[in-house]
Amino acid sequence: MNYILSHKGLIPGKTSLLLNGFCLIVLFLFLALPSNGQFPLKVMTFNIRYNNPADSIYNWDHRKDMVYEVFLKYKPDLAGLQEVLYTQLTGLRDTLKEYSSFGVGRDDGNKAGEFAPIFYKTSRFSKVDGAYFWLSKTPDLPGSKSWHAACTRIVTWLMLRDRQSGQLFFIFNTHFDHASEEARVESARLLRKKIDEIISGRPVIVCGDFNSTASDSAYRLLTQKSVPGFLTDTRVSLPDSVKQPSYSFIGFPFHPEEGNLIDFIFTRNAQAWNVKTQLIITDNRNGLYPSDHLPVITEFLVKGLK
């Protein structure tokens, strides 16, 4: 007979129950581990629409809770946001406690103008390095613009270490100009050049609002396979059944027949990052959407380091 020691002395017959309970806990922990050493990673790109009081019922006060809900419901591990003014950024930071953020205002490299910030889960990633550059002929000059761009445009990048997989990787986030095709093409050219200079062959994620569809010159330049260092659209490898809807920009009010796909998540040097799926989120409240863009999420399975 088995015994265990308690404050009442030896009690027969309980050891097997304790052992069984211990075995169940070990089995649960084992089953909870990612299979084949692969770790799920959700990356989101989301143009949240700047706080414009003239938007009337579509202004930020009517939409901000829905933007927060996208984070709280879909729980992206990483998110590149666009059109974020400083007051919006502080609201996001105050609400999304489990995330850290990185970025500056595009007009002065501080708080003025729109940010293209990167949000990342503090518990999962550690920041190794990070900076920004401007999409212009003088990329190190805050507030600079070129190529007949209507607005100043910025790129934010981070070097992160994934505590789960052990991977060291980069994420870039940007917003190309909406008015000048020349600016979009030259921005694509500069973005590829800067990625070459910064990443040292490591995996990279590139996300943003590119104001370009897959048939436009800027997109083709980013993904051109004949040039070394091309980017891969994470949507391309997926079956058609998961490629709905076929648009990410919807406007205010929502006119699906006028929508188009201009928000993308790209990768490079990410051979060990398998694209599991992509989701374009259409959540709304009686036809009121969180933004004039839909959030786009790509979920990866990232191979852990041996």
Image (cartoon, rainbow, N blue to C red):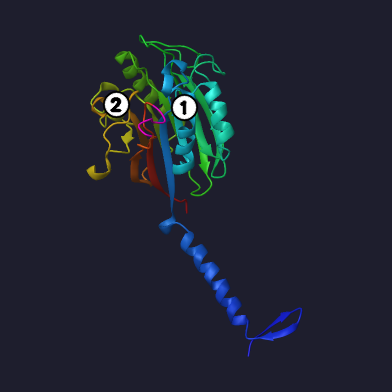
Name the residue at the bottom extreme.
1
| Nearer to me, 55 or 155 | 55
At a point 54% along the width and 14% down the height, the residue shown is 108
The region drawn magenta spans 286-291
When asked about the image quadrant of residue 154, the answer is top left
Q: Earlier in the sequence, mark 1 or mark 2?
A: 1
From the viewer's perspective, is residue 293 above or below residue 98? above
* Left or right: 2 as drawn, with respect to 146: right
Callout 1: few (<14), some (14-19), or many (20+) C-alpha neighbours within 10 Å? some
| Nearer to me, 128 or 291 | 291
**Distance between mark 1 and mark 2 Cα atoms:** 33 Å
State the image coordinates of residue 235 (x, y, percent, origin top left).
30, 38
Name the residue at the front extreme.
286
Q: Is residue 194 visible?
A: no
State the image coordinates of residue 228 (x, y, percent, origin top left).
31, 31
Res. 62 mark: 1
State the image coordinates of residue 127 (x, y, percent, origin top left).
56, 36
From the viewer's perspective, is residue 133 above or below residue 29? above
When asked about the image quadrant of residue 279, the answer is top left
From the viewer's perspective, is residue 143 above or below residue 251? above
* Left or right: 248 as drawn, with respect to 141: left
* Residue that label 2 marks: 219
